[in-house]
Image (tube, rainbow, N blue to C red):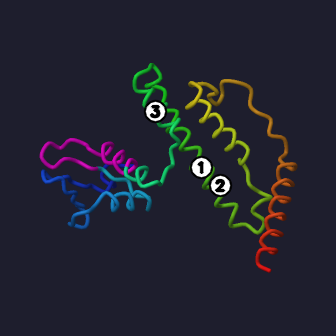
Amino acid sequence: MAEETKLLIKRYASRRLYNTETSDYVTLEDIAGFIRAGREVKIVDLKSGDDLTRQYLLQIIAEHESKGESVLPINVLTDLVRSYSTSATSVVPQFLAMSFEMLQNGQSKMLENMEKMNPMSSMPGFEAMKAQQAAFMKAMTGGIGGWPGTGPEPDFGDGKQELEEIKSQLANLQDKLARMNK
């Protein structure tokens, strides 16, 4: 996204954050809301011009994690800390960016399929998304490895068996819900 389309937030010496589009002060939660709504933000120090975006994004994540809104498991956080002191430092950012991009693409495809009449019958990439998640977790917990394209592609079959299992599980859940409502 181009620099000029980013929402510019200026940090004053008082540490207050100023939204240059709306000419008002904002909080970290406001900035998190802008990001959730799809906006790109850039936070700069008014006096020095330093880009503080990374620092504030990390602070937003830390605040959510401290409130019990845990997204990152302890072992992933631990491995991230370790990556700062190893030769893996140069590999980790690209791997994380690629993994999140694949996750976002998978979520978009899943949402598209949810809008169709029978969402379970046409969820392309579900198994590939699971495989990517497994590779991510393996890399973050057991050392960097399992990069896409470095070995034979997994055989996911035609997915009919998984679909039948999902349908069976869905039917069981519906039966349980029906019994609970009686």
Q: Quadrant of residue 8?
A: bottom left
- Answer left or right for 39 relative to 92: left
Please name the residue shown 38% across and 47% down the image. Answer: 62
- Give residue 109's mark: 2
Check the image and report above or below for 136 versus 159: above
Please name the residue shown 38% across and 57% down the image. Answer: 32
- Answer left or right for 40 relative to 143: left
Kind of residue indicated by mark 3: Leu
- Give residue 105's mark: 1
The residue under label 3 is 80
Name the element at disc 2. helix
Name the element at disc 1. helix
Check the image and report above or below for 145 versus 38: above
Single out the residue that lies furthest toward the bottom: 182
- Answer left or right for 99 relative to 83: right
Please state the extent of the stretch shown in magenta in the rendering.
Answer: 43-62
- Give residue 32's mark: none
Kind of residue indicated by mark 1: Asn
